[in-house]
Image (tube, rainbow, N blue to C red):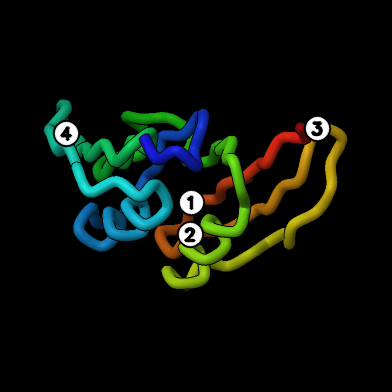
Amino acid sequence: MSSNIHAMVANVEVENLEDAIPLYQELTGETEVRRFPYRELELALVGPFLLYSGPLENYVSQNGTVIVGSLAPVLKALGKAGAEILEAPNEVPNGTRIVARHPDGSVFEYMQLRA
């Protein structure tokens, strides 16, 4: 796991693993990708992200929260990947967050916790 991402809850539905994996490698700083089949699904583990491609009814929500040490590298990676920023960095009671829609359609909240 990248030192920038400390914790997350995310299972991400993607249309094509080949197109999605580079974004998640950029977000996590991971070079290693573990791919494996599970029933009718094609799965890839990239750092803490579990990506899946296959029938939606066989899996769970594509939304999640990611706890990071700094939002700057996340914003850079999202921009490079062409993600849509739904909520610019804003203060919330427990820190600063951004919300972004990835090119694969998944939506994530990235949270930098208050020290």
Q: Is the C terminus in the top left, top right, bottom left or bottom right quadrant? A: top right
Q: Earlier in the sequence, mark 1 or mark 3?
A: 3
Front residue of 99 and 94: 94
Q: CA distance from mark 1 to mark 2?
A: 5 Å
Q: Earlier in the sequence, mark 1 or mark 4?
A: 4
Front residue of 27 and 12: 27
Secondary-structure class at tag 4: loop
Q: Is the N terminus in the top left, top right, bottom left or bottom right quadrant? A: top left
Q: CA distance from mark 1 to mark 4?
A: 20 Å
User: Relative to residue 94, is residue 83 depicted above or below?
Assistant: below
Could you tell me if the residues under marks 3 and 4 are in contact, i.e. CB atoms within 8 Å?
A: no
Looking at the rendered structure, which numbered label has been put on residue 102? 2
**Could you say where residue 51 lies in the image, as x and y percent from the top left?**
31, 41
Could you tell me if the residues under marks 1 and 4 are in contact, i.e. CB atoms within 8 Å?
A: no
Secondary-structure class at tag 1: loop
Residue on which the image places disc 4:
40
Could you tell me if the residues under marks 1 and 2 are in contact, i.e. CB atoms within 8 Å?
A: yes
Q: Amino acid at mark 2?
A: His
Q: CA distance from mark 3 to mark 4?
A: 39 Å
Q: CA distance from mark 4 to mark 2?
A: 24 Å
User: Relative to residue 78, is residue 65 depicted above or below?
Assistant: above
Looking at the rendered structure, which numbered label has been put on residue 106? 1
Mark 2 burial class by Cα count in 10 Å: few <14, some 14-19, many 20+ = many
| Residue drawn where x is 27% and y is 54% of the image | 21
| Residue drawn where x is 57% and y is 62% of the image | 75
Q: Earlier in the sequence, mark 3 or mark 2?
A: 3
**Could you say where residue 18 lies in the image, as x and y percent from the top left?**
20, 58
Q: Amino acid at mark 4?
A: Glu
Judge left or right: residue 115 versus residue 7: right
Residue on which the image places disc 3:
94
Q: Amino acid at mark 3?
A: Asn
